[in-house]
Image (cartoon, rainbow, N blue to C red):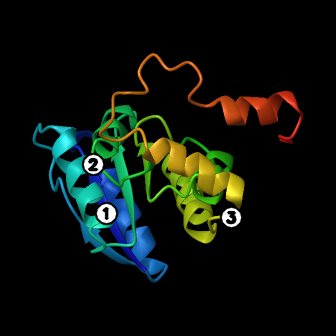
């Protein structure tokens, strides 16, 4: 599996560690930068990772900055990227199994390296659970891209709320 990885200057050391960790597990890792600790802007590297994934050059992506918040938002702006900011194993599994996220984000300064390794293991070992419901939810989310006609539409997710009210969701 080919994985794109990118970060800002705050967590270059952690990105380098995770890159090596993934390579030792047999992944081919494409390093999208940054490569040093010189101040830079995280959106550059989030965009690079997302583009590698949505064009098919890489299968999945990993991004990180100090908190993970900024760089995951940058990834989300690339059409076709589905990125989740996760801080634990359960969230990593959910991101892949239910939402079919093709990029995962972590906060390098808020999650320890050991936790990030566990998150990577969980994310990369989890398969998307293709169900009509999961596909419908992802389709709804994807349909938000390049549209504004849903703004103010308080009924956009009604079908899912109706299922909730009927007790069809079991966590």
Left or right of 105, for residue 98: right
Category of crowding for the residue at label 2, using alpha-carbon neighbours closer than 10 angstroms: few (below 14), some (14–19), many (at least 20) = some
The mark that comes first in sequence, 2 or 3, is: 2
Q: Which of 171 and 160 is in front in this view?
A: 160
What is the C-alpha distance between the residues marked 2 and 3? 24 Å
Q: Mark 1 points at which residue?
A: 54
What is the C-alpha distance between the residues marked 3 and 1? 20 Å
Left or right of 33, for residue 66: right
The mark that comes first in sequence, 3 or 1, is: 1
Q: Name the residue under label 2.
A: 78
Q: In this view, does 166 lie above or below 58?
A: above
Spot occupied by residue 94 in the image (x, y as percentages of width and height): 65, 51
Q: Quadrant of the C terminus?
A: top right
Spot occupied by residue 133 in the image (x, y as percentages of width and height): 70, 52
Spot occupied by residue 158 in the image (x, y as percentages of width and height): 66, 29
Is mark 2 in CB contact (under 8 Å) with mark 1?
yes
Q: Nearer the viewer, residue 130 or 50?
A: 130
- Outermost right residue: 167
Q: In which quarter of the image is the N terminus?
A: bottom left
Residue drawn 60% across the image and 46% down it: 137
Residue drawn 61% across the image and 31% down it: 157
Q: Which mark is residue 129?
A: 3
Q: Which of 122 and 118 is in front in this view?
A: 122
């Amino acid at each position: 599996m080919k994985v794109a990885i990118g970060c800002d200057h705050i967590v270059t050391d952690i990105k380098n560690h995770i890159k090596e960790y993934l390579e030792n597990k047999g992944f081919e890792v494409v390093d999208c930068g940054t490569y040093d600790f010189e101040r830079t802007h995280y959106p550059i590297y989030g965009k690079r990772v997302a583009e590698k994934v949505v064009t098919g050059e890489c299968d999945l992506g990993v991004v990180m900055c100090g908190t993970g918040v900024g760089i995951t938002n940058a990834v989300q702006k690339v059409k076709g990227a589905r990125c989740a900011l996760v801080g634990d194993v359960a969230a990593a599994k959910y991101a892949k199994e239910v939402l079919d996220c093709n990029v995962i984000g972590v906060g390098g300064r808020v999650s320890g390296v050991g936790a990030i390794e566990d998150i990577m293991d969980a994310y990369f070992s989890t398969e998307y659970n293709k169900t009509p419901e999961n596909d419908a939810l992802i389709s709804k989310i994807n349909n938000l891209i390049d549209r504004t006609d849903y703004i103010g539409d308080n009924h956009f997710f009604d079908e899912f709320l109706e299922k909730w009210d009927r007790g069809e969701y079991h966590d």
